[in-house]
Image (spheres, rainbow, N blue to C red):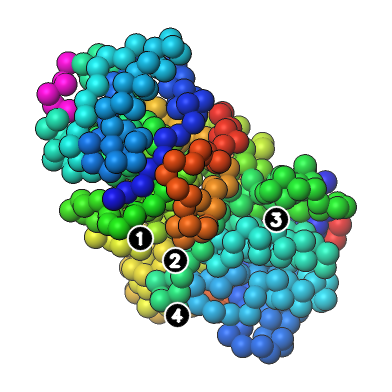
Amino acid sequence: MKAGTNLEKVLENGIFAVTAEAGPPRGAVPAVIQRKGELLKPYCDALNVTDNQTAIVRMSSLSGCILLKQLGVDPVMQIVCRDRNRIAIQSDVLGSVSLGIGNILCLSGDYQSFGDHPTAKSVYDLDSVQLIQVLHQMRDEKLFVSGEKITGELPIFIGAAENPYADPFEYRVLRLARKIRAGADFIQTQAIFDMEKFARWMEMVTDQGLDKKVHILAGVIPIRSVAMARYMKDYVSGIYVPDEIITRMQQAERPKEEGVRIGLEVIDQLKEVPGVHGVHIMAVGWEDIVPEMTERAGLLTRPVL
Amino acid sequence: MLISKQKPIDEILRYLTGEENIFLVGCKGCAEGCETGGEPQVLEMQQRLREAGKRVTGFSLIDFACNEQLTRMTLAAHDSQIAASDSLLMLCCGSGVQAAAAAVDKAVHPGCNTVSLGGSHAEWREGERCLECGDCVLDYTGGICPVAGCPKNLFHGPCGGSRGGRCEVHPDLPCVWQLIVERLTKLGKADKVDMLIPPKNWGVSLTGGPPPPPVSSPAKTSALQSEAKEV
């Protein structure tokens, strides 16, 4: 065990894992994230707390994780490279581990021009692969980037993201392999809609035996409306929504139910894709649907380890 | 003037691992003024490469290597020598390295670190090519700069937003990492895209560090000094 978090235990026991996302509020009211934690706790093994996603200012991921931890939820702290340099990041990692946060997901971060502070100066002292390297070195060699010694243990279960739909396609598997070599223990992918392309990607992943070296959780986004589907297709970085999905949402009499159905079909197929070890449900602003989705997808009850 | 410093010879020789025939390029602009890539330095480098067992196929001094057209024309005159070479070693600023990379289908290695703009930027129609970061990575990236060309300064791109070869932040521009992957693949150097690049030394850059030291002082730090982990 690297960190002994609930997520790690579930994955190491070969159980098909379920993670979900709890976006922190645009304010300091703890109840917002506490409510999401209480709601989702029985339906997933760990909860990601995003780090100023889409470059919009929100409560910090670290504080969100602490609030969840207090409820007994296993949090996944997301760290983006956009806003903090190696000094701040390493310091936050020490702090979060000291508070019992064990899962950390390394991301480069959405560029600030997409968010509400486009005039901000970005940092990008490290990139996401270097961040993985840094956490790996901190945990396994007990060394900061500088080479100075860290006192005590630093149990971290290191996560990374990958987008099977970004270009160049063949190169994405190489990039995944590189993240694994850098030290990633688990991967959460961008949302999967085009199953055929994802299956091709996973085939390359399993051909190289990468699924034996890392736990891959495939991303699922339940779509609420055709407007949301169109918005994601046109404006959200890295998400690929096929026209067929837009048409289905457009023609549906009850779009919400159609969105859930699309999500359930995706989960059903994901369960059959070799090398997929779980799903990561990103119900952006629609967390209330996760209990129903996990129930209908046959993912309950979640194990107590 | 762009202020450059020659990289340590060990680092240069590391770039040339597995290569025998090297074409040398100097620059009679800023690099000559900095005494990093003028004729005496090119001749000295020729000697050092020979001592290291390399064959120098020829050399060229470009008036301003940062001028892409001029570099293209000057190198065209050395066509056969370049064809017989494994790579080009560039004693000039990062813009010059990239001008050569744009002109020839051979690996180009930076022989200098560009540490300061010293007044003005090199000119290239599509915009900034060298941000004078002081720790040149062009050897790892096929002669195309991700520090200047990728909004996120990624060293392991393309990011998840790259689609159809365009940059997600500036869709009117190409994704610089797509270009890097394509070029390294074309040169048969795809293994370079598979390397792990350790955290960069930003302490020598204009944005990250103290003012650059005088030109004549010896280099204290070198590019990604702890060697990038090979696969």
Q: What element carries label 3?
A: strand
Q: What stretch is highlighted in magenta?
A: B75-80
Disc 2 designates what residue?
A111
How many numbered dots are placed on residues in this image?
Answer: 4
Disc 3 designates what residue?
A17
Do the numbered discs 1 and 2 sit on residues whose CB atoms are within 8 Å? yes
Depth check, front residue: B65 or B31? B31
Kind of residue at disc 3: Ala
Disc 4: host chain: A
Point out the image quarter for the C terminus of chain A. Answer: bottom right
The answer for how far apart the CA atoms under marks 4 and 2 are is 11 Å
Kind of residue at disc 1: Glu
User: Which mark lies nearer to you, 3 or 4?
Assistant: 4
In the image: residue A101, left or right of residue B205: right
Q: Where is residue A36 in the image (x, y as percent from the top left)?
A: 68, 79
Disc 4 designates what residue?
A116
Q: What is the chief secondary structure element of the magenta stretch? A: helix
